[in-house]
Structure formats: C-alpha cells, structure tokens
Amino acid sequence: MEVNFKGRVAIVTGAGGGLGRQHALALAARGAKVVVNDLGGAVDGSGGSLTAAQRVVDEIRAAGGEAIANGASVTDYEAVQAMVGQAMDQWGRVDVLVSNAGILRDKSFAKMDLADFRLVLDVHLMGAVHCCKALWPVMSEQKYGRIVLTTSSSGLYGNFGQTNYGAAKLALVGLMQTLAIEGQKHGIHVNCLAPTAATRMTEALFPPDMLSAFGPEAVVPAMLVLAAEGAPTRTTLCAGAGGFEAAHITLTQGRFLGIGADVPERLAEQLDAVRDRAGESVPGSGAEQGANEMRLARGGR
C-alpha cells in the first residue's frame, strides 16, 4: 500500500493540538490539503478561539503545504455543514475525514451530572455524526471517501470515571460498523482508531519516564493507513508507543438450550460453555448473530 495523499483533501477535527495536530501535519506532509478544525476550547469544552487552529495552519504552510483554519464546534451541525462548504469552495472535494474532536468531563457515575454525560456524548458521538452526515453526499458523489473515527480503550474495555466518555467511544464503533456497510457501494471506507497517547487530556495518567514514548506522533501511522487509498474498512486499530493491535467484537459458538421453564437454570449452569471463546467469529453484520442462533436451533448444522 502506498500511503500518500497527493491530490486529496482532508478535514481533521480537534486539530489545534495533541493528536489532531499530529494528524493534520502528517496528512499535509504526505500531500493532502487540510482543513484544520478546532474550537479552541479547554479540555472540558469551555471557551473557544481560532488561534490554535491557525497556528497549525501556519506550521503546514511554513513547510510548503496547503491548509485553512476552521473554528466550528462539531456539536453545531450547521457550522459543520459550513466547514464542508468551505473545503468545497476552496478545493472542490473532500476525501478524508479524521474525526478527532473531543472533551473530558470525568467523574464516577454516582457523582456525574447528567449534563456532563450528555455534553460528552454530544461532542464525541454527535460531533462525529454531524461530520459524517455533512460529508456523506460529497463522498458518495465522488465515489470515494475515507473516514477515521476516534474511539478509545475506555469505550472498548471500560475505565473508571469515564462512563460518559466510554459510552460515546463505543458508540462510535457501532457507527463505524453500519456506515462501512452502507458506504461500501459508494467507495467510502470507515474505520476506527483507538489511540494511547500523552496529550493535554491524558498526560497526567502516564509515568514521567513514559511520556516521550507515548507521544501522539506514535499513533499517526495507524491513522495514515486507515485513511489511505488502500485502507481497509470496518477495522479498529489500536496504537500507542510504537505498538499496534486490532480490536474485534466477536461472537462465540454458543450452546443450544431450547425453550422451557428450566432454561434460565440450565443457562446459568452452562454459562462458561456459552462464553467459551474457542472457535469464536467476527460477524460480518448483525444478521450473523441470528444466523448462528438458527444454526444452533437446527442442531448445530
């Protein structure tokens, strides 16, 4: 696979610093024209300024690339539509979306205000939905698109104090699964990236001697592969400190227990067998769960 973006146009949200900045710089270095989007707010989403986005644009231009700044909040669908319009007016197409914008409002679930839960969902999940929705007609018309949604190990596997963040991040995997199916006929590939990186949102979680190893630039190769012309689709790549893994939602072979009054007790007795991961599969669609249950009902054929 050749990983270059000559002639391509990319939108990177949350690109004023951290991971987003590195994504924007890397895409530009490999030939992409880049819309650098950033609200310019604090880690909790408060405030806003175009300064951070413009600073990254200046970096790209100083290196000989092409970029424009945009300060839209991804929570504002009309502003996101205007951002896509800005890219179309400037360059006539958009090939790549790296949906990276996010905030944190961490607290244990017992102490979390519901407004903070909703806001995190609004930024991470609905922010990605807004960007995908605004770009879908453009990419469908082009018969080409590459979308990279930023998920997280907190969504895939859980993390104390992040029910809002984790729920939003796993929801993005669900969004990817169906968008990839629907986008296939239009040449639109949709993938997820689960980064482990020391940024202003996360650097307090890392031991001081590991901060440099977990720099955001170490995640960028996974993004580039997921956004390239030869990218897979429906893939969740995990990346951090030079290591790369793939995450899957799998289905076990299961057990047939039938229907009857004693099934709850029998299921409880055989739960380990139902959960046995030997021979598990990665379903190609949600229908495959039903197909497996039909197989079990027919005697395992």
Image: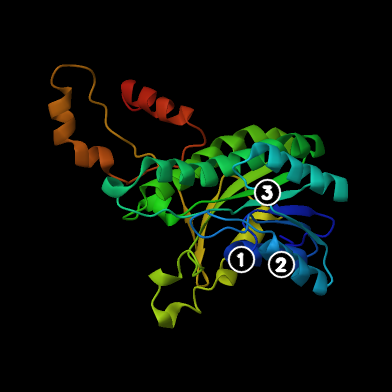
Depth check: 279 or 130 in front?
Answer: 130
Residue where numbered disc 1 is placed: 17
Which mark sits nearer the N-terminus, 2 or 3? 2
Residue where numbered disc 2 is placed: 56
Q: Of circles 2 and 3, which is in front? A: 3
Classify mark 1: helix, strand or loop. loop
Q: Please state which amino acid type lies under the numbered disc 2.
A: Val
Q: Please state which amino acid type lies under the numbered disc 1.
A: Gly
x and y percentages locating residue 202 in the rendered image = 45, 66
| Circles 2 and 1: CB atoms closer than 8 Å | yes
Classify mark 3: helix, strand or loop. loop
Give me the residue at 46% from left, 30% from top: 288
Which mark sits nearer the N-terminus, 2 or 1? 1
Residue where numbered disc 3 is placed: 72
Which mark sits nearer the N-terminus, 3 or 1? 1
Q: Quadrant of residue 85?
A: top right
Marks 2 and 1, how far apart at CA: 8 Å
